[in-house]
Amino acid sequence: MSASRNLGISLARGEYLLFVDSDDALAEGAIDRLYHCAVEDDVEVLFFNASAVFENSFVRSKYRDLKTYYETREDLSAVVSGIQMISRLAEAREFRASACLQLTKREYLLKNSIRFIDYILHEDNAYTFELLLRASRVKRVNEPLYIRNVRDDSIVTSRTRFAHFYGYLRCYMRMMTLSGLMEYQRLDEEKGVQIITRQTARNTLGTWSRLDEQNKMKLNTLSPLEKYVFDLIRSSESAGYAGTGAGRTSWLVRKYLNMLSVTANYYRKHGLALTLKKIGCHLRAKSWR
């Protein structure tokens, strides 16, 4: 789905972008209502609510928590920055990482080169996080303008597979990289970011714990960096995210992910030969200390 959405972003020509999953629908008059709200306050991202419709009574009973999951209550109708929105969503426990519940200014996406991570599940988590981190004007309307059809075999409700775990892990890595580049103006802003990234780490561990042994054997397909980050997540969780252990883990994750990001950017600008030369100089400098 990520690749299809990214293609849609590149091909779209309208002023705003709105994603709708193939088995879902928009409420009557939703587009007019959303467009009016977005234009009136000149927002880059407009969030809204959804109502859940269940495939049958069995699905309704099995996933009853989803009935009110998309019905947020905190009043976030005032225009704020994206980082302030993260803080308020985290405090209210109403961070809903669904690209389908966002109307986004297309120019804003293109200017900041915001895209979904290709070929993973749960890609909405990193996408929504980045969308908010970079935005200066965001608001939410607490109206159910989207209709979520809950089925027994969707990405959200299907049996947990390695792809679910991997999707959360990749999102966590991306979110930690982005959060490490931020300059926070207030303590509550940094706290909100930490709450959201920590929840993604716990989702990573939660999906891992639900995997059968056959799926867990696929851990060997991870890259060395992915394995390292997952080991750090596991060690933090065993420590209960308490004290200096959690802080050191977050610092280590950011350190290595930022190092990887810097190297990738240098490679894109200067090519392989100069990048390898730069790495060699760095390693020799470290060995002399």
Image: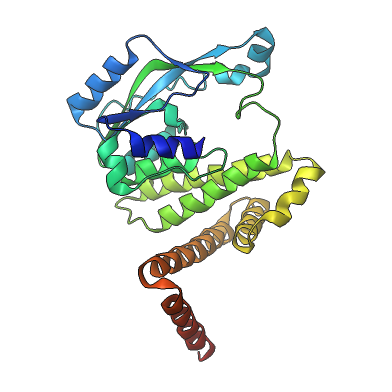
Vertical comparison of 115 with 5: above or below: below
Q: Residue furthest bottom?
A: 288
Number of marks in picture: 0
Where on the picture, by quarter, is residue 5?
top left
* Residue 73 seen in this snapshot: no
Viewed as shown, does residue 45 lie left or right of 150? left
Depth check, front residue: 121 or 190? 121
> Which residue is rendered at x = 78% and y = 50% of the image?
217
Vertical comparison of 133 with 46: above or below: below
* Residue 55 seen in this snapshot: yes
> Which residue is rendered at x = 20% and y = 26% of the image?
39
Viewed as shown, does residue 40 lie left or right of 144? left
Vertical comparison of 116 with 259: above or below: above
Where on the picture, by quarter, is residue 71?
top left
Vertical comparison of 210 with 241: above or below: above
Task: Report x, y in % for residue 7.
Answer: 41, 38
> Which residue is rendered at x = 37% and y = 45% of the image?
114
Q: Residue furthest front?
A: 11
Task: Report x, y in % for residue 276.
Answer: 48, 78
> Which residue is rendered at x = 65% and y = 54% of the image?
239
Colouring convention used in this rendered image of the protein? rainbow
Viewed as shown, does residue 249 lie left or right of 91? right
Task: Report x, y in % for residue 55.
Answer: 61, 11
Viewed as shown, does residue 161 lie left or right of 270? right
Depth check, front residue: 6 or 105? 6
